[in-house]
């Protein structure tokens, strides 16, 4: 399970992975579906990965491959736990 705390993603073991930040403050409704795993951001023209379609290991691998990867994370995704 991955944890989101203070806009940061951590592994279950507490390893920091990434800070969640959208400089354009684009909402999920402004993303255009490309295929079942990817979306296109109208704000910055970047590709956004839909984490609902990935395993925890795949999310970690995407972040490891590109720390600046854009992610769409749903609060309903069972692989993520949101903490305050």
Image (spheres, helix red, strand yellow):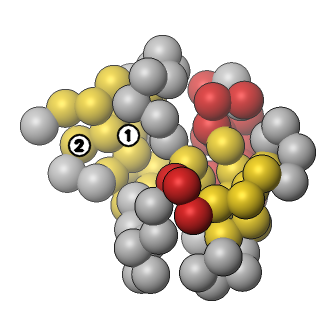
| N-terminal-most mark, 1 or 2 | 2
Find residue 12 and report its horizontal and vertical position in percent: 38, 24
Q: Are marks 1 and 2 in contact (CB under 8 Å)?
A: yes
In front of the other: label 1 or label 2?
A: 2
Vertical placement of 12 versus 34: above or below? Answer: above
Whether residue 73 appears in this view of the structure is yes
Image quadrant assignment for residue 32: bottom right
**Residue underneath mark 1:** 10
Q: Disc number at residue 5?
A: 2
Image quadrant assignment for residue 66: bottom right
Who is closer to the viewer here, 10 or 82? 82
For mark 2, does the 10 Å Cα neighbourhood hold few (<14), some (14 to 19), or many (20 or more) residues?
Answer: some
What residue is rendered at 39% in x and 45% in y? 9
Vertical placement of 78 versus 30: above or below? Answer: above
Q: How far apart are the alpha carbons under marks 1 and 2?
A: 8 Å
Task: Answer left or right for 34 relative to 59.
Answer: right
Q: Secondary structure at mark 2?
A: strand
What residue is rendered at 64% in x and 60% in y? 31
Who is closer to the viewer here, 40 or 79? 40
Total marks drawn? 2
For mark 1, does the 10 Å Cα neighbourhood hold few (<14), some (14 to 19), or many (20 or more) residues?
Answer: many
Find residue 5 and report its horizontal and vertical position in percent: 23, 43
Task: Answer left or right for 67 relative to 61.
Answer: left
């Amino acid at each position: 399970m991955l944890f989101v705390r203070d806009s940061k993603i951590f592994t279950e073991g507490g390893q920091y992975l990434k800070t969640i930040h959208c400089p354009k403050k684009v909402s999920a409704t402004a993303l255009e579906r490309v295929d079942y795993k990817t979306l296109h951001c109208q704000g910055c023209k970047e590709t956004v990965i839909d984490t609902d379609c990935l395993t925890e290991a795949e999310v970690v691998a995407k972040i490891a491959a590109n720390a600046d990867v854009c992610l769409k994370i749903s609060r309903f995704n069972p692989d993520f736990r949101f903490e305050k």
